[in-house]
Each structure stands twice: as C-alpha cells, then as structure tokens.
Image (cartoon, helix red, strand yellow):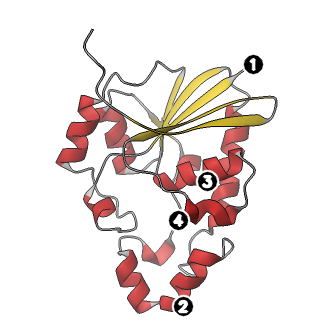
C-alpha cells in the first residue's frame, strides 16, 4: 500500500513578506490571484486537510479545495513572539533568538520548540502512512520543514536549513515505514488542452 501526501505551502501574505511570525492575517491579493490561477493543478485526493491558520484555509479555498482544518497540522507556536517580525524580536531579545535558531529544544518565546513541532508532525505522518491513496494538506512552511526532516530521518537541527517558498508542493510517498521525497514543485495554472 502506497500513501502519498502533498504538502502545499500557503500563498503569499503580508506577514510572509515582512518575515512576521503568523499574526492570523489573510493571504494578500497577489497570493490569492496566484492560487486561483493554479486551481485544478493538483491531482484529486481522498483527503484534503489544512493547518488551522487563516492563510492556509484561504489558500485551500483559492485553489478550489474544501479542506478540513486539523489542529495537529498547526504551525509552530511561537508564544509571545506571535505577530512580531524576526527583526523586532532579534533587536529586543538577541540572545533568545540566537538560542532558538541553533537549539531545536529551545523555546524562549514560551511556545513550542522546533523538536516538539517535528515530533508532532512526525506523528501525523505515521498516521498518514496507514492510509491508502493521496492526501493534500495546505500547511504552514514550518510544517513542511518538519515533515521533510521527519520523513528522511534527519535531526531536528536541519529544520532551519530548509526553505519552503509560497505556493509550492512537496510530495511524500511512502510504504512500509519509509518515505520518498519530491521537493518544491511550484503550483502553476493547468495548461489548456
């Protein structure tokens, strides 16, 4: 039995442009337009899931997907840093940011550590591997990073070395406890026949 999980990163938003920790904001108009133009580019799936964030739910809707928000697919909880830019936090708490960016067990913001996120996402992947067919999940970039690290058995420290551009697809296919990876395919409008 082969399971396929297509992880779709959300469309561009003001928060992403500003390197702002998720503030609950919407995707911007250019991101929504790109997502709408890519509607139909994804294959059919038995399940469509989303991170519970506004930008993931809006991206799914713009892609023409009726996704179910799943709390376990939430992005990294950054506690008191939520809504602030990395530059702002770095200026106010440089040592804390430095520790956070180098130690996957560190959570100076009072939220979740990178390792905790990776373990949470790995549990979801283990569950997905028990399901036949294809799952599409529109999820935060950090969920994609955690999924890739977990699927390949890489240490949590690799999390910061992975970039996930907006509106791209990362595909995992697996069976018998092993995942294969297809990286960062951009979503594009389906070609006219």
Q: Is residue 57 left or right of residue 26?
A: right
> Residue 113 in the image: x percent, y percent?
63, 69
Q: Is residue 153 left or right of residue 144?
A: right
Marks 2/4: CA–CA distance:
19 Å
> Residue 189 in the image: x percent, y percent?
28, 26
Circle 3: element type: helix
Going from the N terminus, do you reach mark 2 or mark 3 first? 2
**Do labels 1 and 4 touch, CB within 8 Å?**
no
Going from the N terminus, do you reach mark 1 or mark 4 first? 1
Q: Which residue is mark 3?
A: 146
Marks 1/4: CA–CA distance:
34 Å
Q: Would you place residue 86 above or below residue 5 in this image?
A: below
Q: Which residue is mark 4?
A: 77
Circle 2: element type: helix
In the rendering, which numbered label is found on residue 1?
Answer: 1
* Foreground: disc 1 or disc 4: 1
In the image, 192 versus 54, the foreground residue is 192
Going from the N terminus, do you reach mark 3 or mark 4 first? 4
In the image, 116 versus 192, the foreground residue is 192
Going from the N terminus, do you reach mark 2 or mark 1 first? 1
Q: Which residue is mark 2?
A: 95
């Amino acid at each position: 039995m082969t399971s396929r999980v297509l992880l779709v990163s959300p469309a561009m938003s003001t928060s992403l442009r500003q390197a702002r920790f998720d503030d609950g904001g919407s995707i911007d108009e250019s991101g929504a337009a790109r997502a709408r133009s890519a509607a139909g580019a994804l294959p059919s799936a038995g399940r469509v899931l989303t991170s519970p964030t506004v930008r993931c739910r809006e991206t799914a809707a713009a892609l023409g997907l009726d996704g179910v928000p799943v709390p376990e697919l939430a992005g990294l909880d950054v506690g008191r840093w939520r809504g602030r830019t990395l530059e702002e936090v770095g200026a106010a708490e440089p040592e804390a940011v430095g520790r956070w960016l180098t130690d996957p067990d560190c959570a100076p913001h009072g939220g979740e550590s990178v390792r905790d996120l990776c373990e949470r996402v790995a549990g979801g992947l283990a569950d997905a591997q028990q399901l036949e067919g294809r799952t599409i999940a529109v999820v935060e970039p950090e969920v994609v990073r955690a999924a890739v690290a977990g699927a390949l058995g890489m240490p949590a420290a690799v999390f910061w070395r992975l970039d996930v551009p907006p509106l791209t697809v990362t595909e995992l296919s697996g069976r018998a406890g092993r995942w294969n990876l297809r990286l960062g395919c951009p979503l594009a409008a389906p070609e006219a026949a």
